[in-house]
Image (tube, rainbow, N blue to C red):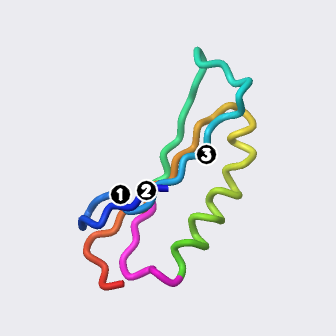
Amino acid sequence: MRSTPRAGACVWEAAIPPPPEASAARERSLLIIVPAFNEEASIGRVVADIRACATHLRETGLRVRVCVIDDGSFD
């Protein structure tokens, strides 16, 4: 998890790595970008839900990253 306080920056990123047996030669990745503005109360749940949905993708060797973008929230 990574925090960045600058507006417009990726303020939260969670990497869901592929399983160890996935071949580097066929590595694929998916970046999910989630816009957020004043979502402090719900953003943790949203990211958790995305990660849960991405579990089966990870099993196929897909590297999944979630990036939450905030552009000047007050919370």
Magenta stretch, residue numbers = 34-41
Instruction: Identify whether 53 is placed above or below 37.
Output: above
x 56%, y 29%: residue:
28
Q: CA distance from mark 1 to mark 3?
A: 16 Å
Task: Determine whether, in the image, residue 14 is placed left or right of residue 17.
Answer: left
The crowding category of the residue bearing disc 3, from other C-alpha atoms within 10 Å (few below 14, some 14 to 19, many at least 20), is some
Give the quarter of the image for residue 60: top right
- x%, y% of residue 13? 46, 55
- x%, y% of residue 25? 58, 14
x 40%, y 71%: residue:
36
x 62%, y 60%: residue:
50
Give the quarter of the image for residue 10: bottom left
Under circle 3, the secondary element is: strand
Residue position marked by numbered label 2 in the rendering: 2
In contact (CB < 8 Å): disc 3 and disc 2:
no
- x%, y% of residue 30? 53, 41
Inspect the image, locate mark 1, and give the three-letter code of the amino acid beneath it: Cys
Question: Of tags 2 and 1, which is closer to the observer?
Answer: 2
Residue position marked by numbered label 1 in the rendering: 10
Under circle 2, the secondary element is: loop
Q: CA distance from mark 2 to mark 1?
A: 8 Å
User: Of label 2 and label 1, which has the lower sequence position?
Assistant: 2
Q: CA distance from mark 3 to mark 2?
A: 13 Å
Task: Determine whether, in the image, residue 61 is placed left or right of residue 42.
Answer: right
Residue position marked by numbered label 3 in the rendering: 16
